[in-house]
Image (tube, coloured by chain):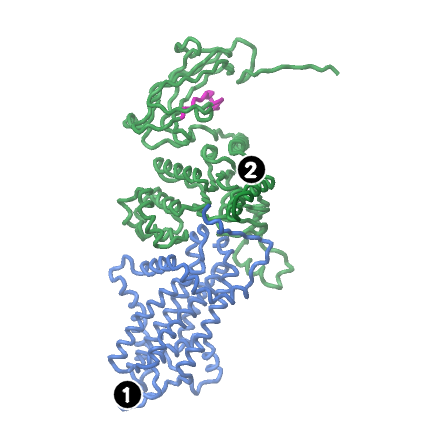
Amino acid sequence: MSESMSKIEEQVAGTASGADLQRARLSTSPVIRVEDVHKTYRVYRKPMDRLRESLPWNRSKGPLHKEVHALRGVSFEVMPGQCIGLVGGNGAGKSTLLKLLTGTTRPTHGRYSLRGKVAALLELGAGFQKNATGRANIFMNAALLGRTREETKAKFKEILDFSELHDFIDQPISTYSSGMVARLGFSVAVATDPDVLIIDEILAVGDMHFRRKCVDKIMSFKDRGKTMFFCSHSLYDVRQICEKAIWMRTGAVQMYDDAVAVTNEYATYENQLIEEQSEHVQSLQIADAAPVKGAMNPKNAERYARVLSAELIDGETGKPRHKFQPGDSVAVRVHIKNGKQPEPLALAVGFTRADGTLCFAPTTEMDGVPLDVQEAVVTLRLDNLRLLSGEFVVPVWLLDARGVHRFHETTCAQNLIVQNRTKELGLFLTERSWSVESL
Amino acid sequence: MQAPHLIQQYDAAETPRGFLYHAVRAWRAPGVVFGQRTLTSHFFLRDLQSRFRGSMLGGFWVLMQPLFQFAIYFTVFGMFFGRWEDKDTVLFALWLFSGIICFHGMVSGVGSAMNSIVSNANLVKKVAFPSEMLPVVPVMVEAAVLLVGLGVVLLIGGVTGRLSFGWNTLAIPWAVANVLLFSAGLGLLLANLTVFVRDVKNIWQFASTAWLFLSPNFWWPDFLYGREPWVFGLLGMNPFFHTLVGMRQAIGLVPETLEVDGRIVHNLGITTTLVESLSIGSGWAVLFLVVGYGTFMVHRDKHADLV
């Protein structure tokens, strides 16, 4: 870190002014820096105890409150342009951390600093007034986010266009659906063009069409080098949108690393918990990608990208076949057609055991295969099938290029049946060797 | 690189700024309200509109409440108890009404102000903004209502010739400012207290009623003459006493001598001049503002955790 800093300083010193130096320093110093932050809430059994505790003659009787530690020693740094995901169970301290960064509450111990204009979407439409019209609320909410009337006026059309609430803007908010309120809130917040965007669980609201617009907007923020802090229960979203992620557990940072690594660790941990409670839930699946609204409706078949057919074939002969042995060459042939407004796509193929366990699921997006076509036959070939005996469902997902939105989902007509003639046990065939050292 | 100068930082190890730090900065409170005028005007309009949105008579109700109160008090105190029998009926009515609108303005302003943090919990918890403006807004709304009421008083007083207009008329904004600052200070003080002790609003309900009767609303100060000295001392300690008296002097309700129907109406027992009354009123107002703003700001960061 300091090494790279001095390098840049050298480069800059050769050419230019202090302003450039300043800029270079800023782009290499963290936007968010949190150091050993603790947050403790005092919980009183009854309101009277708060008063009794503050009386000087009650000091000797000891505290009358219980302490709840929402955060215990959280430290991390976020560099400019990074998008950080925040995952963790309920009560892990995610919301407290976000509130702290927003500035609505203060840490009990430790320090933090934030650089740049911060906009927080802790709750869409916080501060909306039910009786006022959408138009009045846009101005009100923008004012809360620190905008003057003139600035909001200049952005008004942009906000309205993004929210798509043209017909309702002069109606009171009380006539809006919750999704519409969320749309308005998001539109206002992103229009303020912050340097640091803090988002808490907001993608769960609004219809899928709007959710897609939100994600695209968030992505465009990222592309412009803005910093983002993104809290979500959808691990899939965190993985697709963020580079790095923080996993919070019982008020502390359990893991701060690459988003894929963190979500995997967290999913494993969660699954263990769930197994202990003897429930079965899949926590990390492509099926978590939100469907594009209307895309699943057969009426819209022509409008959106679709999978026309998907079948299992023999990898060598190219003939339809669904019964294989381990080591055989298996292929999945998928016929796809782009939508009316063609866009780059991604295709995912999964192999799922009857009990729902996803064994593996390669996607063109993660393998870096571009899929910018009008209509195509895409073939996934597995030359040396490693699966052992069992019946596997083969789902096929057609997604947008980022793998965030789901256009179509189908399964191959026949299930993949693997029959092994060897004594191998379990799910997978693995390369292996034994060694015996006699002692 | 946009606005790199905007840095927010907080270190819990630093000693938090104490009461004195904030108290001496109470003069900044009006600056906050003006500096955030976009937001203030939104809150102001929201508050004003919420009072008569959906009602048939609309803005009319703003005046109706003090008018009804006046009618009741005038009937009870004027007719049943004969407070005005040795005085001038119209003079008593104007004295009563001008007192009621000031006092009612202060009480309902403070009443809404003290609940403003708790009732805007969602806002205080989720959005970082200068929340010290929340208690000030309802007080400003009440001040606007007070101005309308004063217009009515001046109109009636002018038509009936009971008010004297002159230099004292120029002091009306000062008198209104006293009511505004006093209410804002008390509002901030109690708004902060309400966050910690919710019982404050219940206490306020009967405390304000007691205060109403202890203030020169239904009686004028000469009522105190010949009473036990402690009564005079107690009622004179009333921090709102001189604001109420000063307001009557500013609208020209307290002439040195006034001849009505061949009788001399004396100065109603008021011993201070207009400037003295308003200055003492301002003194109390500033004291409440400094204490209110100071305590509010010291505890402001805790509000989001408690509401």
Whether B167 is drawn above or below A93: the answer is below
Residue A9 visible here? yes
Identity of the amino acid at label 2? Answer: Tyr
Residue stretch rendered in magenta on the structure: A346-360
Q: Residue at x 55, y 54 (%)?
A: A44
Q: Residue at x 34, y 52 (%)?
A: A139
Magenta portion: prevailing SS class: strand
Name the chain letter of the residue that bears numbered label 2: A
Q: Residue at x 45, y 25 (%)?
A: A368
Residue B137 is situated, as x and y percent measured from the top left of the image, at: 39, 62
Identity of the amino acid at label 1? Answer: Val
How crowded pointer 2 is (Cα within 10 Å; few <14, some 14-19, many 20+) is rated as: some
* Residue position marked by numbered label 1 in the rendering: B260
Q: Are marks 2 and 1 on the same chain?
A: no
Q: What chain is colored green?
A: A
* Residue position marked by numbered label 2 in the rendering: A256
Instruction: Locate residue B121 relative to residue B75 in the image: left or right.
Output: right
**Numbered label attached to residue A33:** none
Q: Nearer the viewer, mark 2 or mark 1?
A: 2
Rendering colour (chain B):
blue
User: Viewer-proximal residue, A29 or B268?
Assistant: A29
Residue B157 is situated, as x and y percent measured from the top left of the image, at: 28, 79
Which type of secondary structure does the marked residue at label 2 adopt? strand
Residue positioned most to the right = A439
Which type of secondary structure does the marked residue at label 1 adopt? strand
Residue A123 is situated, as x and y percent measured from the top left of the image, at: 42, 46
